[in-house]
Amino acid sequence: MKQAPINFATYLLLLVVLLATSSVLVDGHECKPSGKIKGTKPPKGGRNHGDDSDSCEAGKHYPIYKCSPPVTKHTKATLTINSFEKGGDGGAPSECDGKFHSDHKPVVALSTGWFNNMKRCHKFIKIHGNGRSVKAMVVDECDSTMGCDKDHDFQPPCPNNIVDASKAVWKALGVKESDDRFGFMDVTWSDA
C-alpha cells in the first residue's frame, strides 16, 4: 500500500499543534512545595498580633516554596495585609533597603519566587482587584522558604502566591476595613 505524501498544509497544522501544546505545558508549570518546616510555639508575648496575622502552631508542618507561579499579564494571587512600619506585623525592616515604610504608601512584599532574589526591589507592580487597579512598589519578600522563628515574627512561611500589601493598597482598591475581604482577597497583578 502506497502512502500519500504529506503536503505543506499538513506540516503547518502539525507545527501549530506542537506550538500550542508546548505553550500549554509551559503555562501549566506547577510550583510544588520544596519541603516542610515544623512549627514552634512563640514565646509568651514574643510576637506582634497586628492585622490578625497567624502564629505558628507547635508541631504543625508548614510547606515551603522556592518558586511561585509564572508571572503573566494577569498573574493570579492572594492579596494580604501587612504593616511595613516599625513595630508593625511585618517584623524586621524591608529586605530591599533595610528601612521601614509608611502604611500610607502603596508598598508590597512578594512571595519568594516572585521576589526573585531582590530583582523586583523598588520596581512597581500593578494590582487589579475589586474593579480597580493600583501601582505599588516592591520593598520586601514574603518569605516562602522560612518561618516560625523570631525573624519572621513566629508566623508560618508565606504561600507561593502572595502579594502582601500596605493599607494604602487596600484603600486604593476601595476595600474598606469593614469588608469581609479586607486582609485576604483574590487579585491579579503584573509588572508595571
Image (cartoon, helix red, strand yellow):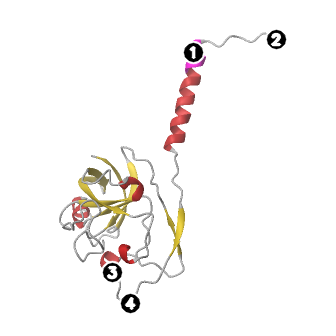
Q: Quadrant of residue 143?
A: bottom left
Give the residue number, with chain letter if any, for mark 3: 49
The amino acid type, in three-letter code, at marker 1 is: Ala
The reply to whether discs 4 and 3 touch (Cβ–Cβ < 8 Å) is: no
- Please give left or right for residue 118 compared with residue 24 in the image: left
The reply to whether discs 1 and 2 touch (Cβ–Cβ < 8 Å) is: no
**How much space separates mark 1 and mark 3, taking CA atoms?**
64 Å
The amino acid type, in three-letter code, at marker 3 is: His
Q: Quadrant of residue 165?
A: bottom left
Q: Earlier in the sequence, mark 1 or mark 3?
A: 1
Say the numbered circle drawn on residue 1. Answer: 2
Give the residue number, with chain letter if any, for mark 4: 44
Badge 2: residue crowd in 10 Å (few <14, some 14–19, many ≥20):
few
**How much space separates mark 2 and mark 3, taking CA atoms?**
78 Å
**How much space separates mark 4 and mark 2, taking CA atoms?**
83 Å
Percent across and percent down for residue 153 are: 36, 76
Q: Residue at x 56, y 28 (%)?
A: 17
Foreground disc of the pair 1, 3: 3
Give the residues in magenta. Answer: 8-12
Say the numbered circle drawn on residue 156. Answer: none
Q: Earlier in the sequence, mark 4 or mark 2?
A: 2
Q: Quadrant of the N terminus?
A: top right
**How much space separates mark 1 and mark 2, taking CA atoms?**
23 Å
Q: Residue at x 44, y 75 (%)?
A: 148
**How much space separates mark 4 and mark 1, taking CA atoms?**
72 Å
Percent across and percent down for residue 112 are: 40, 58
